[in-house]
Amino acid sequence: MDTWQDIEISDRSFDGDLITGQVFHNATFQQCRFVSASMDSTRLKGSHFAKCDFTRCSLADCSIMGCVFTECTFVDATFFAAKLERARFIGCNFEGADLRAITCLGCDFSFSSLRQQKLASLSLQGSIFVECDLYAADFTDSNLGDANFTRSSVAQAKFENSNLKGANFDGVDLKQALIKGAILDLGGAIAFAQSHGAQIEP
């Protein structure tokens, strides 16, 4: 098993490389390319990836713990069954990516595009989606308790039968969101009512 530890790499291409099962620990990658690379079952811990391109990269069954990805591209990438813990994806593009069956604990997707993502039946409790593009994202049957959706776009997003207790919808227009059967607390119910023009009186 190869280990990439305490290294800094910039402007390097790993396109199409086989990196399966390797370990990245406290590594920094800037403006690197991992297009169509195979990173299945890799272990990433405490590493930072800035402006890297993971288009069509396979990250299935990988473990990502305490890593930061800033302005990275994950278009058509595969995260199937990946384990994400305290990972931050800031300003990233996940359009067309496969996020099915992921495990997500305390992750931050702020300012990212998750348009039309299939995120149904996942545990996303406490996740952060501040100012995200969530157009037509499918959160059906997911646990989104205490999640933060502040100022995100949720038009056509599906929250049906999901747990939204404690979720923060400040600055969110829920008028076009689908929430049939969702569990809301008082704050969520007020946000939904206000999005439909209701006036809340004390």
Image (cartoon, helix red, strand yellow):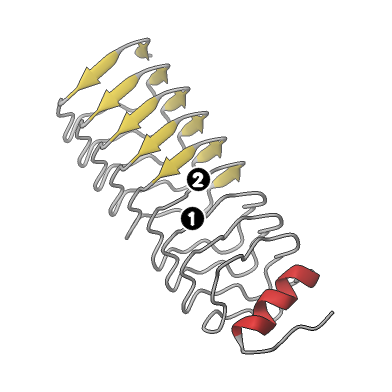
Q: Which residue is mark 2?
A: 81
Above or below 193: residue 21: above
Left or right, residue 191 beside residue 91 = right
Disc 1 or 2, which lies upstream in sequence? Answer: 2
| Quadrant of image for the N terminus | top left
Picture quarter containing residue 163?
Answer: bottom right
Residue type, label 2: Ala
Residue 100, labelled with which disc? Answer: 1
Q: Name which residue lies at 62% across and 66% down.
A: 169
Q: Amino acid at mark 1?
A: Arg
* Quadrant (top left/top right/bottom left/bottom right) for the C terminus: bottom right
Q: Quadrant of residue 22?
A: top left
Regarding mark 1 in the picture, which secondary structure is present there?
loop
Q: Is residue 19 left or right of residue 33?
A: right
Element marked by disc 2: loop
Please name the residue shown 56% across and 50% down the image: 128
Whole-percent x, y for residue 49 in the image: 33, 30
Q: Position of residue 44 (x, y in %)?
A: 44, 26
Distance from disc 1 to disc 2, alpha carbons, whole Å, reads 7 Å
The residue at the point 30 percent across, 42 percent down is 72
Displayed quadrant of residue 11: top left
Indicate left or right for 1 with 201 as reference: left
Q: Answer above or below: position of 185 versus 64.
A: below
Does residue 197 show up? yes
Q: Residue at (42%, 46%) from the top-left corner? A: 79
Q: How packed is label 2: few (under 14 Cα within 10 Å), some, or many (20 or more)? A: some
Residue 91 coordinates in the image, percent (x, y): 37, 48
Whether label 1 touches label 2, CB < 8 Å: yes
Residue 176, percent across and down? Answer: 51, 83
